[in-house]
Amino acid sequence: MAAQDEIGLLDAASDVVSPAARPVPERDHPEGSGLHVLLIVENVALCVDQRVRKQVPSLLAAGHHVSVITRRDPGNAAWRARPGLTVFEYPAPPEPRGLAGYVVEYGQAFCAAAVLAVLAHRRRPVDVLHLCQPPDVYFPIAWWMRSTGAAVVVDQRDLMPELFAARYGDRRRMRRVLHWLERRTQGAADLAIGVNHYLETRLLAAGARSVAVVRNGPLADRVAAARPDPSLRDGADHLCCWAGKMGRQDRVDLLLEAIRYFVHVLGRHDTRFVLLGNGECHDELRARATALDLAGWVRFPGWLSEQDLFTHLATADVGLDASLQVEVSPVKVMEYMAFGVPVVAFDLPETTALLRGAGVGVPAGDVVGLAEALSALLDDPDRARALGDVGAQRIADELGWEHQAAVYLAAIDRVAAPRRAAPGRRRTSRRRDDSRGTE
């Protein structure tokens, strides 16, 4: 695929690929020139998804051709210049409001992905379908892809039943539906990928044939390029950061309660807090911070580029997390660790497994304990430095993407091996007749 290829767009009104944006015909690929890996990512755009932004370059560097189906975003344009990568976009759905909103969003995303997956496969037969989960709705596409000879990989970041319970409570009927979708998805996959061993156990129980654990650590060169900016402290002695998408399950509301105790009960006025990111709860949390009289201590700069995010982390004294999701290995925690920033978080199994001497854990939901642990750590810079050093070393030795990419690529090659060996499986790409706008 030529680097300057245009993006495939889904016309929302007609559910067809827009002729004005049809991809330029791709060059023929020689036999055995690498796999064609098709990734479908729904939750956020390619340019935002931290995991896909590491997986795609790793696949390209390994000699594979990569296609990505993703929601439309201006930031995706920068990815079009990458040789070997084709980006197919569909109109981004509106931010969902409640359960009905998610049903509409996932329905639109499925229809778009189904059409664009057919287009991608016709342009060059897909060897590996890589589903970035959730949502667990793409198994019909997986069934079809398997019938063409493609292998199917499910990259499970979150578990929909647990995620739903964290957001809306334990509604038994809905959880049954979500578990049914989960079983269909895992049953359609040749391989599941999880970010920790909790997910490995859960996915095997849900019917996965096999599971590979691939952590989501940061890239060392991007971390090394970041420089601190003392002006971000806004004149304060200390800077503490939280980073991520602000969904209800992320419990940033608990973090604000801990900051309120830190500022107004412990009387700590020497620290600034920056909550980096956006999401459905962003405006609500800003209003909550104002109501708690925290406007002078807490800033909400919104979603930042990775460069700006890393500048904040390179400046920070402590990284914070308030999630209560036992199944999650927070990406933010690994990013804090990469910068040698000690972490204060709730003591959850996977968070604690990541930290292992790189931070302080307090009982889950204990906002007073979170505030007091933060205060004590800021008053003990030698301890903070020692914790940060442990975290940075763990990223450098084990958790960084440079190490995890090897595990990821080996898993892709392993699952695709039978397809590669199948007679007639490796085919050159088909050319489209642009005069008619069809394959």
Image: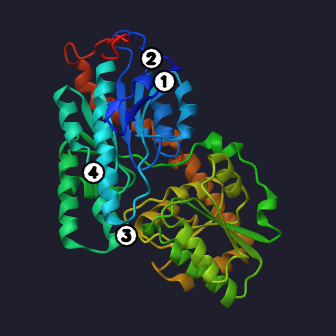
Q: Residues within 10 Å of mark 1 (few under 14, many from 20)?
A: some
**Labels 4 & 2 near each other (Cβ < 8 A):** no
> Label 3, label 1: how many angstroms apart (C-alpha)?
38 Å
Residue picked out by circle 2: 24
Q: Secondary structure at mark 4?
A: loop
Residue picked out by circle 4: 136
- Residue 149 falls left or right of residue 273: left
**Labels 3 & 2 near each other (Cβ < 8 A):** no
Kindly report which numbered mark, 1 or 4, lies closer to the viewer in this rendering: 1
Residue 195 percent location from the top left of the image: 40, 52
**On screen, 351 above or below 34?**
below
Residue picked out by circle 1: 6
Q: Which amino acid, mark 2?
A: Val
Kindly report which numbered mark, 3 or 2, lies closer to the viewer in this rendering: 2
Q: Residues within 10 Å of mark 3 (few under 14, many from 20)?
A: some
**Labels 1 & 4 near each other (Cβ < 8 A):** no
> Label 4, label 2: how many angstroms apart (C-alpha)?
32 Å
Kindly report which numbered mark, 3 or 1, lies closer to the viewer in this rendering: 1
Residue 131 percent location from the top left of the image: 33, 41
> Observer-nearest residue: 433 or 61?
433
Q: Secondary structure at mark 1?
A: loop
Residue picked out by circle 3: 167
> Observer-nearest residue: 345 or 148?
148
- How many numbered badges does the structure rendering display? 4
**Labels 1 & 2 near each other (Cβ < 8 A):** yes
